[in-house]
Image (spheres, rainbow, N blue to C red):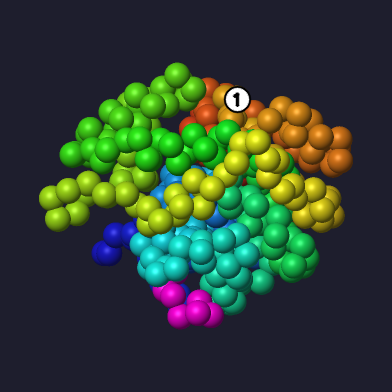
């Protein structure tokens, strides 16, 4: 008797020929509306591993779950031109993958940058989304959080071991993510780093940080209120981390005013962007998705 794998890895060529990778969970299930998980700017499909395992079981709704590595992240190929690491190109890549896998209407869980991509998709392909979960992201981004992200990687040398990586992540984040256990910090290290050929390296193309370096804190980033307004026609859950520095309370409140029926929750004891399998969040996500059937 064969033992089923946790997930099936895949790679698809997108319109410019680059190979984009990802993971398929519960692909033997027959739910009509798969869940597509889109990660943050330097993150990858492993952010959703525990959540996807839960959602693909009877307790989580027996769902098919697709988690995508954007170009330059995780197991996807790096782009030789860092200027192609943009929301619009990553949205196109996502559409290419959904088409290649024969998926129609889907639920999208978008963490940080993934939520921005989801909002773009709702505008350019209105019938694509069955529902959307925005994880610690909204139409207005606090640039200080983005600057913190690139400064973290710019100022930190690479750890020598995965245990050192876990200790580093805990040191940097324990004050704003007290909900994390030692095990969570070890998982976080493996989501961000990999150990190959005797050394630790990042799980993303460091050229991604080039675009973050150009952020001017004296200038307001472009907002996406028009894109968010397109979401008011579908069910939306918005999650805000208790200690986020990317999604302000002001923006979160404005989102609720614009869309009063939107489901809102706070990820207690986490910073940007919450891991959706910590603190029972996976049950709330599964409940929201179940209510849309």
Asked whether residue 11 is drawn in magenta, I would say: no
* Residue 52, visible in the rendered structure: no
Q: Residue at x 53, y 80 (%)?
A: 15
Query: Which secondary structure, mark 1?
Result: loop
Q: Position of residue 216 (x, y in %)?
A: 60, 41
Towards the viewer: 259 or 43: 43
Towards the viewer: 278 or 117: 117
Q: Position of residue 158 (x, y in %)?
A: 26, 41
Q: Residue at x 63, y 50 (%)?
A: 115
User: Does residue 5 sit above or below 102 in this rendering?
Assistant: above
Q: Quadrant of the C terminus?
A: bottom right
Towards the viewer: 3 or 222: 222
User: Does residue 154 sit above or below 198 in this rendering?
Assistant: above
Q: Residue at x 36, y 45 (%)?
A: 192
Towards the viewer: 241 or 62: 241
Magenta stretch secondary structure, dominant: loop
Q: Is residue 47 left or right of residue 251?
A: left
Q: Position of residue 13 (x, y in %)?
A: 46, 78
Q: Count residues near mark 1 (Cα–Cα under 10 Å), then give few for <14, some for 14-19, many for 20+.
A: many
Q: Which residue is mark 1?
A: 242
Magenta range: 14-20
Image quadrant in which you'd find residue 239? top right
Q: Quadrant of the N terminus?
A: bottom left
* Residue 193, visible in the rendered structure: yes
Q: Position of residue 133 (x, y in %)?
A: 66, 47
């Amino acid at each position: 008797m064969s033992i089923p794998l946790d997930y099936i890895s895949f790679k698809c060529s997108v319109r410019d020929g680059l190979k984009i990778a990802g993971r398929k969970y519960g692909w033997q299930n027959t739910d009509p509306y798969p869940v597509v998980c889109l990660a943050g700017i330097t993150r990858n499909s492993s952010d959703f591993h525990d959540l996807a395992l839960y959602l693909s079981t009877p307790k989580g709704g027996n769902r098919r779950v697709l988690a995508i590595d954007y170009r330059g992240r995780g197991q996807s190929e790096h782009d030789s031109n860092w200027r192609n690491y943009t929301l619009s190109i990553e949205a196109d890549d996502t559409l290419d993958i959904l088409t290649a896998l024969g998926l129609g209407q889907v639920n999208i869980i978008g963490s940080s940058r993934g939520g921005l991509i989801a909002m773009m998709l709702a505008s350019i392909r209105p019938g694509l989304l069955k529902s959307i979960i925005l994880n610690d992201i909204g139409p207005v981004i606090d640039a200080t959080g983005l600057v913190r992200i690139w400064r973290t990687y710019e100022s930190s040398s690479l750890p020598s071991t995965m245990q050192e990586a876990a200790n580093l992540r805990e040191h940097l984040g324990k004050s704003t993510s007290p909900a994390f256990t030692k095990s969570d910090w070890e998982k976080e290290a493996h989501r961000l780093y990999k150990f190959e050929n005797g050394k630790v390296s990042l799980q993303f193309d460091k050229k991604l940080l080039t675009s973050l370096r150009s952020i001017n804190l004296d200038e307001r980033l472009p907002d996406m209120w028009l894109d968010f307004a397109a979401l008011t026609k579908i069910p939306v859950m918005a999650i805000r981390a208790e200690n986020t520095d990317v999604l302000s309370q002001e923006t979160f409140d404005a989102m609720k005013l614009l869309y009063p029926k939107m489901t809102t929750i706070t990820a207690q004891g986490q910073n940007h962007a919450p891991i959706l399998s910590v603190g029972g969040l996976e049950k709330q996500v599964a409940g929201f998705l179940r209510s849309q059937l």
